[in-house]
Amino acid sequence: MIIRDYVPADVDALIDLFRQAVRRVAIRDYSEAQVKAWAPDMAEREKWVERRASRPTWVAEIDGKVAGFTDLEPDGHVDMMYVHPDFKGRGVANALMARVEEAAAERKLGRLYTEASITAKPFFERKGFRVITPQTVHVRGQDLVNYRMEKFL
Ligand SMILES: CC(C)(COP(=O)(O)OP(=O)(O)OC[C@H]1O[C@@H](n2cnc3c(N)ncnc32)[C@H](O)[C@@H]1OP(=O)(O)O)[C@@H](O)C(=O)NCCC(=O)NCCS
């Protein structure tokens, strides 16, 4: 596995990976209507292009395939942490989080925070994050529960 910087040509692979991770993995904790609202059929591609360009994003690659990705905003927000279902349980998220923490140390950040899905909460707990509060977010007509979590570095 390699962890490398995102390049703009990755955007469609990331959109597809996001949809697969939400629809095939997070479906165990959310309804079909909820996962479709979270990862809709038609992604807002321009927003993806803009958001990926606006912050460091890292891609995990296994045998030349995009296996996962994550990001880090300047204030310590980890917005996205997604692993392709075909590669889950193989340490991809571990490797991506190690890269985030390395970047956080370089930037002298004191804290990381995220909004973890029910599905990802055990992973973030394993990485030393603690729940600040559960919350309900309204996405395209659906209410989804997630957890505001943080880790002091
Ligand atoms: C959650 C997710 C990112 C984990 O990715 P992954 O590559 O399968 O995780 P890893 O194999 O790197 O596991 C990392 C550690 O977390 C633990 N972990 C991961 N998922 C877990 C779970 N559901 N329950 C308990 N522990 C879990 C692993 O045991 C491992 O611990 P270890 O290092 O002590 O062995 C991935 O399953 C995913 O994309 N899920 C669906 C989409 C989603 O909800 N994304 C997050 C949105 S906030």
Image (cartoon, helix red, strand yellow):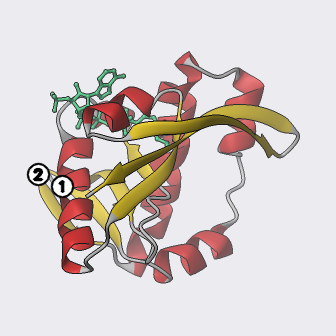
Residue at point 58%, 80% (across, down): 50
- Quadrant field for ligand 1: top left
Across and down, in percent, residue 26 comes to 53, 28
Identify the amino acid type marked 2: Met
Beta carbon of the mark 1 residue lies under 8 A of ligand 1 = no
Note whether 37 is above or below 13 in the view shown.
above
Instruction: For label 1, count other residues whose C-alpha is less than 10 Å away and answer few (under 14), some (14-19) or many (20+).
Output: some
Note whether 99 is above or below 62 in the view shown.
below
Across and down, in percent, residue 130 comes to 40, 37
CA gap between label 2 and label 1 equals 13 Å
Label 2: which secondary element: loop
Residue at point 39%, 68% (across, down): 72
Q: Residue furthest right?
A: 141
Identify the amino acid type marked 1: Ala
Residue at point 58%, 69% (across, down): 48
Q: Which residue is mark 1?
A: 98
Across and down, in percent, residue 51 comes to 56, 74
Residue 13's quadrant in the figure?
bottom left
Q: Which residue is mark 2?
A: 1
